[in-house]
Amino acid sequence: MNRHAVISLISLSLSSFALAADWPQFAGPEHNNVSSETGLLKAFPAEGPKVLWTIQTGPGFGGAAIRDNQVIFLDRTGEKNAEKDVLRCLDLSSGEELWSHSYDAPGDYDFPGSRGVPAVTKSHVFSVGTHGHFLCIDRATQKVLWQTNAFGEGGKPGPWGIAVSPLIYKDSVIINIQAKAGGLASYDQATGKLLWQAQEVPSISYCSPSLATIGGSTQVIQFVESGVFAVDPDTGKVLWKYSGWKCDAPIPNVTALGDGKLFLTGGYKAGSALIQVTPSETGFDVKQLWKITDGSQLHQPLFVDGCIYLNGVTNATPKAGLMCIDSADGKLLWSTGAEMSPHRGALMLAEGLIYYIDGAGNLRLIQPNREAYTEVSSAKLLAGRDIWAPMALSNGKLVLRDQKQMKCLDLRAVP
């Protein structure tokens, strides 16, 4: 191989490395549905982005995690009262199934199907099923290393079962269990040993734990029915709690705006609030900066250039549309209203553009703009109803799904 060919290969490898970024758990590497990828399309071709592959799935809302060019998600199959959870691993480029692990999980809740997103490390896959099966699989052997029950002792399922995703922190994995004695617990990744259980944190929640750094302190933030809690991820000690904002069924993750500001949102008439968390001599002080009636029922909003973009469609506000809110004072800057029929789809930010999958199966590419809704492109890609699963982006490939299929799109810009 001549010198020029070697240089070309090195350049190609470096550019590929710059483009690639894993999406190893729910809401991405930073828990905020923001991708660091570059070299993506600035607008869709007339025929829409290229579909690399499509596979059939069972019903559900379980989105994908992507690591090392492997797509891992929890599927659900089988006839009524004989259902199985199926953890599936696919090749990102081709959609070929590399391995799967299934187990009996009969019975269904309202809105049947899969729920959470697995968390994937270099060596392990962690998954929580709708019926509480919390397991760790060895990626090399595809064998179950350990398993426990996410309902915990004395726990009871809500009307939608368990709909949370595991959170990776150092050598531990943290989940919101539905135990009577407390709803947040940390386990050793390798052994499944319980490291701590925050009994002060109630268990009623469909919200997954997330991480935020406040005053130099790394904290696990958890929404529950009675408010918001922050826990030390190393010890399980409750650092602060706030009950000035509550939701009957908390689902979206907290959105961290920086400088200790946290945006809280939910459906069921909960609305939204911005709180300020500040270190103090006794720990942390929390105060509410503003509160509004608009909220997002299912998905975490995006924070871009001082604006909060959220899907305002909830059970209480079915015609609210996609919204842009000024983070300084909570003022509504614009709303698409019912005309765009957004329903309750997911949002993602990549290379300065918002990706939004609406309830009609259209993937919309949106330019953030505080003055008005500014759509760059759209393409019809999915079908049916209840298209609520979160998306995942890695190596220029976007993975999304509806109730019957999962697709992978090529978003890489042509050089």
Image (spheres, rainbow, N blue to C red):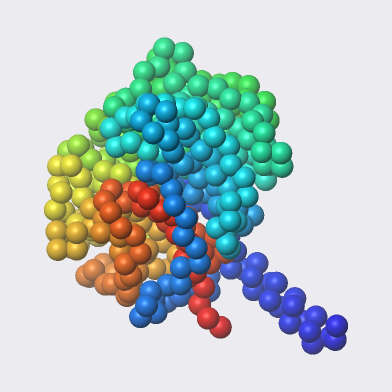
Count numbered badges in the picture: 0
Residue 208's spot in the image, x, y percent?
Answer: 42, 37
Rendered location of residue 111, percent (x, y) = 29, 37
* Residue nearer the viewer, 346 or 252: 346
**Residue at horizontal 50 percent and vertical 59 percent from the top:** 393
Provide residue 6's location: percent of width, then percent of height: 80, 80
Spot occupied by residue 39 in the image (x, y as percentages of width and height): 53, 74
For this view, does 358 lie left or right of residue 86?
Answer: left
Query: Does residue 223 appear in this view?
Result: no
What residue is at 44 percent from the left and 21 percent from the top?
151
> Among all residues in the image, which is located at the extreme front?
79
Relative to 267, 153 lies left or right: right
**Can residue 247 be spotted in the picture?**
yes
Quick one: quadrant of the C terminus? Answer: bottom right
Depth check: give the residue in front, 110 or 351: 110
Asked if 166 appears above or below 148 in the picture, the reply is below
Residue 47 position by quadrant: bottom left
Q: Is residue 131 above or below residue 26?
A: above
Closer to us: 198 or 166:
166
Name the one closer to the observer, 71 or 242: 71
> Does residue 379 sit above or below 358 in this rendering?
below
The answer to whether 190 is drawn above or below residue 339 in the figure is above
Residue name at image x 23 percent, y 68 percent: 373
Q: Quadrant of the N terminus?
A: bottom right
